[in-house]
């Protein structure tokens, strides 16, 4: 993953002891902590401090699980609390070449085991995200995977949700899915509708038009007159969307039937 401009260089200029101090600082920016982990991937003491820093992002922990040196990898593999909170680390640790085959086998065995009495149950990604700070969520929206983005786009904090749709790594299929979600902020739908890249995808526009959550002004600005007859018929019959939108579709369709308007005019 690319680091923010200048961040990698800034971390490289930090003396090793200062980097260790920063790694232990619970008030550190999660992005800086992530870059420290990637810059000092050979330094076990610094990496251990990163792993057990409560502000470490899930993506940082996943990276470290894959590259940690032998002693730290073994410590992570045997840390029940860490694995119960971040169950995805089991698979990441299995990819670590420094981890013994015995511990990898143990991780696979325990993956499907039900929690023992008194043991903290595994947390889902959704539960983990709920416990993150706004800063951590913003960082995860930038660096997380598809599963994380699909959860964060519904976050009640608009900054977090908007960070997801502005992420250059997000794919068209993800945007297609978000455009028809009824449990996202109107600001997210506005952002999609105003983005040239997304507007170029006809199906994204269709999904927005059929989404009852899309503001009327946004829907009417998407170019109803450019829809095909079949698309207009579907839109005019949709009882879930605002009446103004279905009426606009019907009006264009009626004009075409009278021969006064052709698609795209």
Image (cartoon, grey):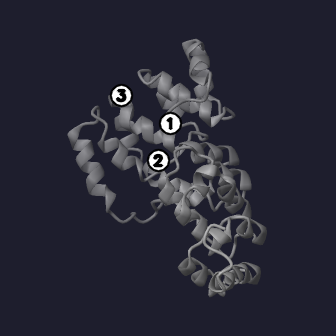
**Is label 3 in a helix, a strand or a loop?**
loop
State the quadrant of the C terminus. Answer: bottom right
Per the image, the residue denoted by label 3 is 69
In the foreground, 149 or 113 = 149
Q: Is residue 111 above or below residue 44?
A: below
Question: Which numbered disc, 1 or 3, marks the residue that appears first in the sequence?
Answer: 1
Whichever of callouts 1 and 2 sits on the residue coming sooner in the sequence is 1
Cα–Cα gap, marks 3 and 2: 17 Å
Task: Estimate the x, y position of residue 114 in percent, counting from the top left.
Answer: 36, 66
Dot 3, how many residues are within 10 Å of its Cα: few (below 14), some (14-19), or many (20+)? some
Name the N-terminal-most of marks 3 and 2: 3
Instruction: Give the residue pinned by disc 1.
Output: 51
Q: Which mark is residue 82?
A: 2
Asked if 126 appears above or below 28 in the picture, the reply is below
Q: Residue at x 30, y 50 (%)?
A: 107
Q: Is residue 10 left or right of residue 220?
A: left
Q: Relative to 96, does residue 190 appear above or below in the rendering?
A: below
Where residue 132 appears, x then y in whole percent? 63, 50
User: Going 58% across and 11% down the picture, which residue do you hit?
Assistant: 15
Q: Are marks 1 and 2 in contact (CB under 8 Å)?
A: yes
Residue 125 seen in the current view = no
Is disc 1 in contact with disc 3, using a CB cutoff of under 8 Å? no
Q: Is residue 66 left or right of residue 220?
A: left
In this orientation, which residue lies closer to the viewer: 78 or 242?
242
Labels 3 & 2 near each other (Cβ < 8 A) = no
């Amino acid at each position: 993953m690319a680091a923010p401009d200048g961040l990698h260089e800034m971390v490289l200029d930090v003396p090793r002891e200062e980097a260790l101090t920063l790694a232990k600082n619970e008030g550190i920016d999660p992005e800086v902590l992530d870059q420290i982990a990637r810059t000092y991937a050979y330094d076990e003491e610094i990496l251990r401090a990163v792993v057990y820093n409560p502000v470490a992002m899930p993506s940082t922990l996943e990276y470290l699980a894959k590259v940690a040196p032998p002693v730290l990898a073994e410590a992570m593999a045997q840390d029940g609390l860490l694995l119960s909170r971040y169950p995805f680390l089991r698979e990441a640790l299995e990819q670590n070449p420094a981890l013994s085959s015995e511990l990898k086998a143990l991780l696979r065995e325990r993956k499907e085991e039900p929690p023992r009495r008194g043991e903290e149950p595994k947390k889902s990604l959704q539960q983990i995200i709920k416990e993150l700070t706004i800063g951590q969520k913003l960082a995860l929206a930038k660096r997380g995977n598809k599963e994380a983005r699909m959860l964060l786009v519904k976050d009640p904090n608009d900054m977090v949700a908007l960070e997801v749709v502005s992420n250059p790594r997000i794919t068209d299929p993800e945007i297609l899915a978000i455009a028809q979600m009824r449990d996202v902020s109107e600001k997210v739908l506005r952002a999609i509708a105003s983005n040239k890249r997304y507007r170029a995808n006809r199906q994204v526009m269709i999904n927005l038009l059929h989404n009852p959550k899309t503001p009327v002004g946004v829907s009417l600005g998407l170019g109803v007159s450019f829809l095909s007859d079949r698309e207009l018929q579907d839109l005019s019959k949709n009882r879930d969307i605002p009446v103004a939108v279905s009426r606009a579709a019907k009006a264009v369709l009626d004009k075409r039937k009278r021969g006064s308007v052709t698609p795209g005019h």
